[in-house]
Amino acid sequence: MMSRAAPFIRRIAAGLILSIVALSVNVAHGADKAPILRGEVVVAGGVVTIGDLFGNAGEHSDKPIFRSPDLGTTASVAAWRVVAEARSAGLLSARAGSIVDVVVTHAAKEVSSDEVVRVIAADIAGQIPGVDPSDLLVTFDQAIDTRFADRKSATPVRIVGSTMLAGNGRFETMIAIDKGGSDERLRIRGVFTETMRVLILVRPIARGEIIKAEDLSQERMPKRQAGAVRAVEPDDLIGLAARRPLRPGQPLAAADFGRPILVNRGETVTMTYEGPGLVLTARGLALEQGARGVPITVMNQQSKRVVQAVISGPGRVTIQSNVTSIASLQKDKP
């Protein structure tokens, strides 16, 4: 009797095992699809939806259940309340799990004081022919705190009205900050000054001293204060010599500098003539001063002849290629 029942019992046991395995798979699959509460949420819009708060929210994802915090701010809400609101909205399987509080951040674009300055400077420059916004120094009567605009906005801050008094540089501007569906408006008053970029010295420079890169600094200065000075680049001055004593902090002009003097009047110089297969040298007395490449008159110290030469380096001149000059050099040769 027992032997005949054994196959039947084994079949029943196998069926139970298969059923348990299938049930386990279905439970696990259901767990994968269960709504999962998030502990931290970042939203871009004005409302928080079930889909923002729960993973696997399915058809209930787009249902709003809370208003978002203010732009750029963060708020927290108790997990039990989130679950209760989600269930009321139809997500009956909502659970808090181990989450105690949900932190919600409303993402936004920062609108800094510098950004407001940039927008206002562009507006002012557009009203003054020939002025570049980067040349305007804009200051406000009162400090402007950082504001927040809609992250999706293409123009987070814009001008909606402005009045400018060019004579004294005063302005009054109304700006609008895009909050996404609404604007925050601010009335801003201040002063603008047209500036120019100038080079200044960082240390005193004596007459004849050679300018090096570390001697120079760039800064902006009110145009009326700079006067007739025209902008120059550092490379225009480096390697030149000061024509007069110069103080640090004063705007520099190209006319303040010239090529370094390599030969002074009354200085003994080496006179050189180079020709095909021939190099002649002699000692001479410079009758003029000058920089590299400048023609001066030089007297041969032995023959007392005066010749034309071109300054080729410190204490060195090159004789022009003419018969008289060559002869004047050759007379000194032993």
Image (cartoon, rainbow, N blue to C red):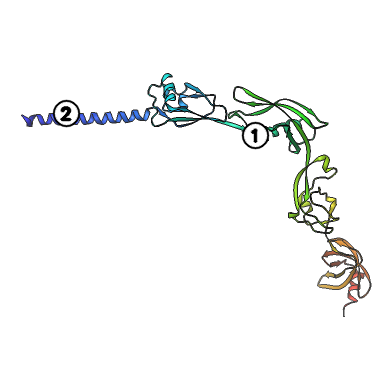
When the figure is inspected, residue 305 is found, relative to residue 241, above or below; the finding is below
* Amino acid type, callout 1: Ser
* x, y percent for residue 118: 70, 34
Q: In the rendered image, which quarter is residue 58 located in? A: top left
Q: Which residue is most to the bottom?
A: 334
* Amino acid type, callout 2: Ile
- Tally the marks: 2
When the figure is inspected, residue 85 is found, relative to residue 325, above or below; the finding is above
* Residues at marks 1 and 2, CA–CA distance in whole angstroms: 74 Å
* x, y percent for residue 112: 64, 34
Q: Residue at x 76, y 54 (%)?
A: 215
Q: Residue at x 38, y 21 (%)?
A: 92
The answer to whether residue 11 is left or right of residue 205 is left
Give the mark nearest the N terminus, 1 or 2. Answer: 2
Location of mark 2 (residue):
12
Quadrant in which the C terminus is drawn: bottom right
Q: In the rendered image, which quarter is residue 331 located in? A: bottom right
Location of mark 1 (residue):
112
User: Residue 59, can we see it?
Assistant: no
* Element type where label 1 sits in the image: loop
Mark whose residue sits in front, 1 or 2:
1
The answer to whether residue 86 is left or right of residue 278 is left
Q: In the rendered image, which quarter is residue 332 located in? A: bottom right
* x, y percent for residue 100: 42, 30
Q: Residue at x 64, y 24 (%)?
A: 184
Crowd around label 1: few <14 · some 14–19 · many ≥20 (10 Å): some
Quadrant in which the N terminus is drawn: top left
* x, y percent for residue 22: 27, 29
* Element type where label 2 sits in the image: helix
